[in-house]
Image: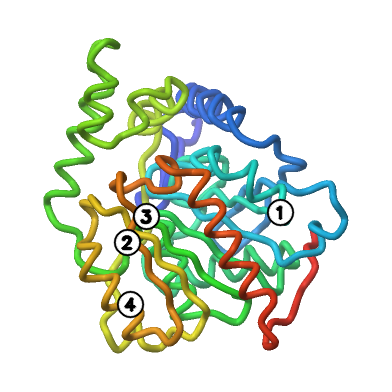
Amino acid sequence: MPKTPARPQAEVGRYVSDAWRERYFAACDAVHALGAPALEERDVETSFGATHVYRYGPTDSAAASRTPVVLIHGAGSCSAMWYPNTPDLSADRPVYALDTPGDPGRSVHTAALHRPEHAAQWLDEALAELALDRVHLVGSSYGGWLALNQAHRSSHRLASVTLLDPGGLEKVGPRFFVWLFVSLFATFAPKPLRPRLAAWLEQPALVVPELRTMTRTAVRAYRIRRPAPRPLSDDELSTVRTPLYLVLGKRSLLLHPHRQAERVPRLVPGARAEIISGTGHGPQIDHAEVINRRILDFMTTIDSSPTHEASPSAW
């Protein structure tokens, strides 16, 4: 008697079918093509499955020896979302973009990843497999929570942390989830209406065809399973000693920018916080050139600090 196929594990992220997985990969590739070409891709094994990594980098040998950047994308997305940032960042230093397990992308999620300590373990294992002993960690939205969680729980590989309108600073209110729902609904709007909706919602996915296709396909193709971004308390946040740069959208619906711009530098010694006008939840997309320059300036300042220990990139 033939065996009944095993049911997929409820606690791991998965594609609903092979066909939808391939459709999503094709959509991701189209968005990746808008940014810098990856020099190489590879998978690294962790306790939670294989993590897919894109490596970008400069051709200049001096730039290639600088402390590398590691990019962690937002929820429900993949490394392709960094397309506005990879050209500038990778011209200055090596860049690694990781697809997080439990979210759509090319990583393969095989074991439950439920708690914040699991998330820190996953990222530390991935960096170890990449032979990266010291990195500048950059996270957007949910990826910002992952970066902040790493600075709190396992900071020994971190030269700095940059948080782009991140989770993990306060409880997410209903206004953010309403914005997500309305933004997704707006992707089905007639083409002539999309620019106006994009401006109203501050949602670039509506006017970048490749990004719109990737966003819509992700919702249909993948069942997300990953830790909830539990906010750090004041006591937990005050444990962070990694140099920290917080970038907030003035019209962010994820958090209250003025509240966090005061709170984070008060609790994290030496942290800098900046509120960017003319943007909501995506400053690195809406103002890519400005944000890229400021991130690089921050990293250069950290690298030139007397206490900084440079570590060359390794693949």
Residue beneath the point at 71% across and 39% down: 38
Earlier in the chain: of badge 4 and badge 3, it is: 3
For marks 3 and 1, the one nearer the N-term is 1
Q: Residue furthest right?
A: 61
x, y percent for residue 134: 68, 73
Distance of label 3 from label 1 (alpha carbons): 24 Å
Q: Position of residue 161 (x, y in %)?
A: 51, 69
Residue type at mark 2 is Gly
Other residues around mark 4 within 10 Å, as few (<14) / some (14–19) / many (≥20): many
> Circle 2 sits in a helix, a strand or a loop, which is it?
loop
The reply, left or right, for residue 184 in relation to residue 111 is left
Q: Position of residue 197 (x, y in %)?
A: 22, 25
* The label number, if any, that marks residue 167 in the structure image: 2
Q: Which mark is residue 254?
A: none
CA gap between label 4 and label 3 equals: 16 Å
The residue located at (62%, 68%) in the rendering is: 125
Which residue does the image show at 12% across and 52% down from the upper left?
174
Could you give the CA–CA distance between mark 2 and mark 4, rounded to whole angstroms? 13 Å
Pointer 1 local density, CA inside 10 Å: few below 14, some 14–19, many at least 20: many
Closer to the chain start, of discs 3 and 2, is: 3
Q: Residues within 10 Å of mark 2 (few under 14, many from 20)?
A: many
Say which mark, if any, is on residue 141.
3
Front one among 252 and 139: 252
Badge 1 or badge 4: first in the primary sequence: 1
Q: Is residue 165 above or below residue 122?
A: above
The residue wearing badge 1 is: 92
Lower sequence index among marks 1 and 2: 1
The answer to the question of whether label 3 and label 2 lie on touching residues, with beta carbons closer than 8 A, is: yes
Marks 4 and 3 in Cβ contact (< 8 Å): no
Q: Observer-nearest residue: 113 or 74? A: 74
- Numbered circle sitting on residue 264: 4
